Amino acid sequence: MRWIGLVPLMLLLTACFNDMADIHEFEAEVKANTRTRVEPLPEMKEFRHIAYQGSQARSPFAMPRREALQERFVQVQDCPHPDPNRSREPLESFALDNLVMRGTLGDSSQLWALIQAGDQTLHRITVNHYLGLHHGRVLSVTPAQIELLELIPDGTGCWQERTTILQMAGSAH
């Protein structure tokens, strides 16, 4: 039985002889017809240094810094405006784009929202807390979203009220 498997192998190996005359002939023909001239190197252009201008900007590899809103504002009578004497809360230094609702805690009597800020810290907020750059006061907290009342400056010294919704991360409405 072993001879049956060895016979094809022996036939295959006998076909591989050391006759390489045609390969040597092809090699000689290629060497005779090939030019050995090397092209000259291209002329180098003079190096011109351009100074980097983005050193004052935030590095794309660093965590975002807290954002700041102009603290001084002119108050005009008979229109809504934020309370300048109210102490600012930690989440008021982040734009709403940098805040993510991650979940809720509590029961039907009081529900707390878990907010992740741009610096990866987690905060717990509820109704009447503030967040965002535009003095956003929390009106309601539900398991799916937070409703805010923001005060947006209109440039004339008055402030416009705007209702904004911050949805739970991953929910699409």
Image: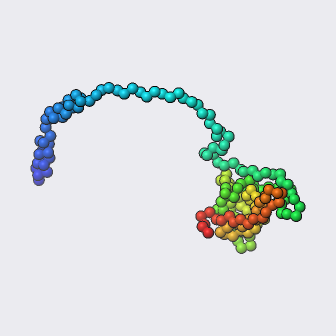
Residue for point 63% across, 45% down = 62
Q: Is residue 26 left or right of residue 54?
A: left
Q: Number of numbered discs present?
A: 0
What colour scheme has been applied to the protein in the rendered image? rainbow
Question: What residue is shown at x 69% (from left), y 66% (from top)?
Answer: 165
Asked if residue 100 is positioned above or below residue 56 in the image, the reply reads below
Which is nearer the eye, 8 or 46? 46
Is residue 20 in view from this perspective? no
Q: Is residue 77 above or below residue 26?
A: below
Q: Position of residue 160 (x, y in %)?
A: 79, 63
Inspect this view and state whether residue 57 appears.
yes
Query: Quick check: 61 left or right of 6?
Result: right
Q: Residue at x 76, y 58 (%)?
A: 134
Question: Residue furthest toward the bottom?
Answer: 108
* Quadrant of the image containing the C terminus: bottom right
Image coordinates of residue 73 in percent, x first then y, are 83, 54
Q: Nearer the viewer, residue 96 or 41?
A: 41
Residue 170: x %, y % from top left:
59, 64
Q: Position of residue 105 (x, y in %)?
A: 68, 66
| Residue at figure coordinates x 62%, y 63% from the top left | 169
Q: Report which quarter residue 12 is drawn in.
A: top left
110 vs 36, nearest the viewer: 36
